[in-house]
Amino acid sequence: MLQDCILVVGAGVAGLATALRLAPLPVTLIAGSPLGHGAATALAQGGIAAALGDDDAPELHAADTLAAGAGLGDPAVARRVAEAADEVVAWLAGLETPFDRDAEGRLALGLEAAHGRRRIVHARGDRTGLAVLETLIRAARGAPHIMIADDLRAVALLRDAHGRIAGLRARAPSGEVALPARAVVLATGGLGALYGSTTNPPGAVGSGLALAARAGAVMRDMEFVQFHPTAIAVGADPMPLATEALRGEGAILLDERGKRFMEDVPGRELAARDVVARAIFSEIAAGRQVFLDARLKGLDGRFPGVVALCRAHGLDPARQPIPVRPAAHYHMGGIRVDAAGRSTVAGLWACGEVASTGLHGANRLASNSLLEALVFAGWSADDIRGNLALPGAPETRTAPRGTIPAPADIRALMDAGVGVVRDAAGLSHVIRRLHDVAADDRALVALMVAAGAFARRESRGGHFRADCPAADAIGRHSETTLDATLRFAGELCGAPQSRQVA
Ligand SMILES: Cc1cc2nc3c(=O)[nH]c(=O)nc-3n(C[C@H](O)[C@H](O)[C@H](O)COP(=O)(O)OP(=O)(O)OC[C@H]3O[C@@H](n4cnc5c(N)ncnc54)[C@H](O)[C@@H]3O)c2cc1C
C-alpha cells in the first residue's frame, strides 16, 4: 500500500538525500528504475566542492561560483550553499561515505578548473558519484520512513481545483496508477540525453521539466546547457568522461599535430568549461582531432575510473593521449525554485539538476551540482515539513496530442542546432521542427531549450550565439511557461522566414 503523504520522484543524489532528510515523515520514493541505475549521480567523477582547506573560505568558493556563472548567479544563494558545504560533507561522512583522506586522516582535496583553491572532496579516487549514490541507497533501504517504488515512472502531476499539487500519475508494469500526495518533490535530473553527444545516461531527457511545465510551473534559463569539454571520443553512448580533475592535476590539450592550442588562452586548460569547450569545438570544426594528454604520475591510483573507461575502449591513457570532444553535460536552467526549493506551483518542490536555484547562473562551476543537490535536499525537506496541507480533489491537464518524434531525430536536431555554437537560423529550424510535436515530453523540453536560446540574443556562459557573440551589458534571467513557449514558437512558425532569422 503506497503512503499518500510525500512523493519524491527520482533516486539520484537529490531524490535520495531529500527522502532521507524528510525523516520521520513517510515518503514514497518513485525511482523510475532499479536503485543505482539511470542516475547521472553514479557517473560523477570529480567530487563535491567544499571550502574546507586551511587556505579556503566559503566566500572564496562563492566568488568562484559567481565568476563561472557569468553575471547570472545569485550571490545570496552562492554564499548560503558554500557555507552549508561542510555540514553536508559531514552528513555524508556520518553515513559512512568512503571519502578519500590524506595521511593524517583529513579529507583529501582535489583541484578543478576555475576553482581558486583545492576544494574538491572525492571518494574512491574518481568514483565519487557512485560512492555517494551507494551510500545514500544503503541509507534509504534501511530507513523505515521511506517506501521505495522503483517500478513506477511519473508521467503527469495531479492538481486540485485550486491548482495545488495533489499527487501524480505514474506508469507501473500493470498500467497507470494515480498516487495522491500532499507534497511532490521532482528530483528527476537533467536533459543531456536530448543530445546525441552527451555524457548523461539515456533517461536524462528532462522528464521532470516536462511534468512541471505541463502543471504550469515557471521555468528559468532553459537555454543554458553546459557542454563538457573533454568527453572521450570513442563512439560510446553516453560518452565516457575524462574528468576535469585530470586537467587540475596537469593534463594538457593537444591538437593532432601535438600543438597545445590552449597555451595563449587565459587560464589555459583550467579556463571555465565553456571557454575550453568552444576552443575544442573550433579545433574540431577546423577538421582537427583533439587529445587530452593525461600521462600523469600516479594516474592509475588517482583516476582509476578514467583509466578503466579508456582501457575498456582499447586506449591506454598512461601511454597515449585520449581523443576528446565536447558533449552535453549539465543543464543550468530548470524549474525555478526559491531558497527553500519551492517551485511556483503550490505543493511542488524541485531539487538537483532539474531545478534552477540561482546557484549556477549561466555556467556551473565544476563539482557544484552534487553540493547543490545535497544542500537543497535539506532545505526542501525542512520547508515541506512546515508546509504540508491537505490535498483537494485530484485533477490533471490533458496533454495535447501530436505525432511522437523518434528520440534519435530530436538528438540529431539538438546536436546540430542547439549545441556548443548556436545561431538564429539553426535555432529557428529546430523550433519549427519541434513546435508541432510538443505533445511529446522530450520534444517539449527540447523546444523550451531552443526557444530560450533563440530569444537570448547574446552570448553568456554556456550559451554561445555565433550571430551575437558579445554579452549584453546587464545579465538577465529568462523565464517561461509552457503556454508562453508554445505561443512564442507558434508566432515564430507563423511569421515569414526572413523575419524569424533576422
Ligand atoms: C559523467 C558525469 C560526471 C559528473 N561529475 C560531477 C562531479 O564530479 N561533481 C558534481 O558536482 N557533478 C557532477 N556531474 C553532475 C551531477 O552528477 C548531476 O548533476 C547530479 O548527479 C544530478 O543529480 P540528480 O539527483 O538531480 O539527478 P540524477 O542523478 O540523474 O537522478 C535522476 C533520477 O530521476 C529518475 N527519473 C527521471 N525521470 C523520472 C520519472 N519521470 N519518474 C521517475 N523517476 C524518474 C532517474 O531514474 C534517476 O533515478 C556529473 C555528471 C555526469 C553526467
Image (cartoon, rainbow, N blue to C red):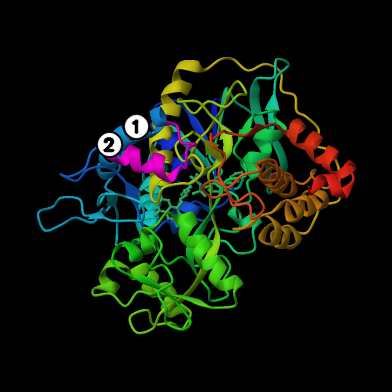
Q: Position of residue 130 (x, y in %)?
A: 39, 56
Q: Is residue 138 visible?
A: yes
Which residue reaches farthest left?
104
* Residue 62 belongs to magenta span: yes
Give the extent of the magenta segment.
Answer: 60-74
Write the residue at 71% across / 43% down: 451
Which comes before the other along the chain, label 1 or label 2?
A: 2
Image height of 181 relative to 200, above or below: above
Q: Position of residue 412 (x, y in %)?
A: 71, 63
Write the residue at 36% across / 71% down: 252
Taking 256 as reference, is 398 left or right?
right
Write the residue at 73% across / 46% down: 447
Question: Do callouts 1 and 2 mark residues in contact (Cβ within 8 Å)?
Answer: yes
Ligand 1 has an atom within 8 Å of the beta carbon of the residue at disc 1 = no
Taking 108 as reference, is 485 left or right?
right
Quarter of the picture containing the N terminus is: top right
Residue sitting nearer the eye, 241 or 363: 363
Image height of 59 relative to 127, above or below: above
User: Which residue is label 1 attached to?
Assistant: 79
Taking 235 as reference, is 123 left or right?
left
Residue sitting nearer the eye, 437 or 67: 67
What secondary structure characterizes most of the magenta part? helix
Q: Amino acid at mark 1?
A: Arg
Would you call the spot at circle 2 few (<14 residues within 10 Å), some (14-19), or many (20 or more)? many
User: Which residue is label 2 attached to?
Assistant: 58
Image height of 185 relative to 97, above or below: above
Image height of 367 relative to 392, above or below: below
